[in-house]
Image: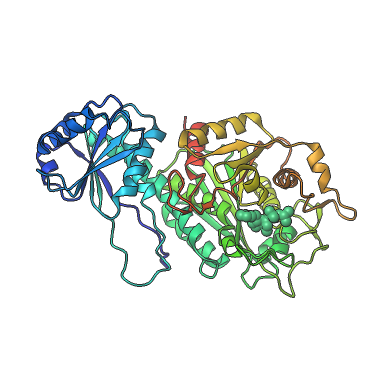
Amino acid sequence: MTHPMTTLTQAKFAAVDIDAIAAFEGRVAVLIGADGKLDTAARRVNRLMKGALARMVESGAVGKMKSGDIKTLAWPSGMAAEAVDVVCVERNAKSDEARKAGVALGKVKGDAALLVLAPQLRRPVDLMLGAVLRAYSFTARKTGDAPKAPGEITLMVANPDELEAEAVDARAVAEGVFFTRDLVSEPANHLTTTEFADRISAMKDLGLNITILDEDELQKLGMGCLLSVGHGSISPSKVAVMEWMGGTKGEAPLALVGKGVVFDTGGISLKPAAGMEDMTMDMGGAGVVCGVMRTLALRKAKANVVGLVGLVENMPSDRATRPGDVVTSMKGDTVEVINTDAEGRLVLADVMWYAQETYKPSAMIDLATLTGAIIIGLGHDNAGVFSNDDTLSRAFLKAAETEGEGAWRMPMGKSYDDQLKSQIADMKNVGGRPAGSITAAQFLLRFVKDGTPWIHLDIAGVASVKSDTTYAPKGATGWGVMALNRLVADMQEG
Ligand code: BES
Ligand code: MN
Ligand code: ZN
């Protein structure tokens, strides 16, 4: 079976060809630093345009530009191009700045072919990645003319062959991000738990070892918390396990665990109507886990990583869990379900326990669109980072910063945990109103074994955003794929 997947804009590297510049139809991008010096290729464009670039520099217009800004000269004389885009970026720009220049170009590019003249840029692959990441559009559910394949991107550089090898990894990253965005964008009647599992199974072709656990197996494992969430839905609950063991034989893997609630109505504790349609993205944590696993497989990472996602739908029905019900986790602890809308933690608790029992992971990171409260606290710029391990958490924050993905550490502590005391069971599934994101994290911590370094990422604010973000047009962002891919490289491939 084939599954719709948004394709990457083609991007390739070529040697600088002075003659080809004049003849290029589409948009030509010229890079310029704050000093306004023209590189060899820019000088060629300047000559073709009879000095227009030099005049632009002399006017002081370039000096006022900030990194990532673009000034466009339309229908330049002496060239076949429809426009010359002058992009401000320093030659030795770090990866995030180089990417932002690419993002800016990706934005103005539209469907046109783009020729980027970058003979002296230190990180052209990052520029390419930025342009490719920005040029995303989810069209799988639109009819009408099939969308035109976007014009390809050519980067003229000093060392095309070397960069082509580096670009393989960058494309693997972009493919992972697009996979996540497609999953997050997909509505819940299309992305059912079964369809989700099928799309994961299709990644067998990439060399991932995939196992799908069905309801009977989950029952036998004792995953009463996870199953209680999916009870009300006609869609069967599932846990999907993706193994990538490309690293040292016998070494414990990193475990990535994702919340995959394909739709969250709130259950019997029904959500209000306004905005409920956004809950198609409540599988965002699982989406990121799948995107990372895809990237690792595509770039054949020398690392051991296992991804586990709990796929359920939270629906009200005669079979649904009631507020006040007490359910038993795989760990054995009982939970009083005060609010059926606090379902993500119930799903994660069982999948996290299973991950630790099965793999004895060296570390465990869970991702979830877990609380509305994290959006109140951090908005859409940063995911909440909760951890029992300073070293792991510092390593993650560094990876996220390098990749330009916002992340902010939040506190934890016993007094928050005390809010989870239940009269009749071992714990309740909600604390009070105060510190809702932290009490959710405290709930999860109860399912982390002593000695397992762990991070919980609350991505409710960053998984899908209603305005453009650094690397994505409005909608699904794929936040976290790049940071986690970098963390895996830092921890296991360094
Ligand atoms: N999926 C929601 C959290 C969410 C809210 C994600 C907004 C994305 C955007 C989660 O399952 C939920 O409903 N959480 C409740 C918890 C509460 C009942 C303790 C919330 O945040 O209101
Ligand atoms: Mn909920
Ligand atoms: Zn939810």
Q: Quadrant of the N terminus?
A: bottom left
> Is 254 positioned to the left or the right of 320 in the image?
left
Quadrant in the rendering for residue 71: top left
Question: Residue 101: percent from the left, percent from the top?
Answer: 34, 38
Question: Residue 367: percent from the left, percent from the top?
Answer: 60, 47
> Is 274 positioned to the left or the right of 126 in the image?
right
> Is 118 positioned to the left or the right of 191 in the image?
left
Image quadrant of ligand 2?
Answer: bottom right
Q: Nearer the viewer, residue 1 or 231?
A: 231
Q: Does residue 132 lie above or below 250 as drawn?
A: below
Q: Nearer the viewer, residue 347 or 128?
A: 128
Q: Is residue 487 visible?
A: yes
Q: Is residue 166 visible?
A: no
Residue positioned 76% across, 51% down in the render: 331
Residue positioned 65% across, 47% down in the render: 376
Q: How is the image coloured?
A: rainbow
Residue positioned 71% across, 46% down in the render: 444
| Residue that lies at the very extreme toward the bottom in this rendered image | 318
| Residue that lies at the very extreme toward the right in this rendered image | 423
Question: Residue 332: percent from the left, percent from the top?
Answer: 79, 52
Q: Does residue 23 lie above or below 202 as drawn?
A: above
> Is 298 positioned to the left or the right of 71 in the image?
right
| Residue that lies at the very extreme toward the front in this rendered image | 59
Q: Nearer the viewer, residue 255 or 420?
A: 420
Question: Residue 398: percent from the left, percent from the top?
Answer: 53, 31
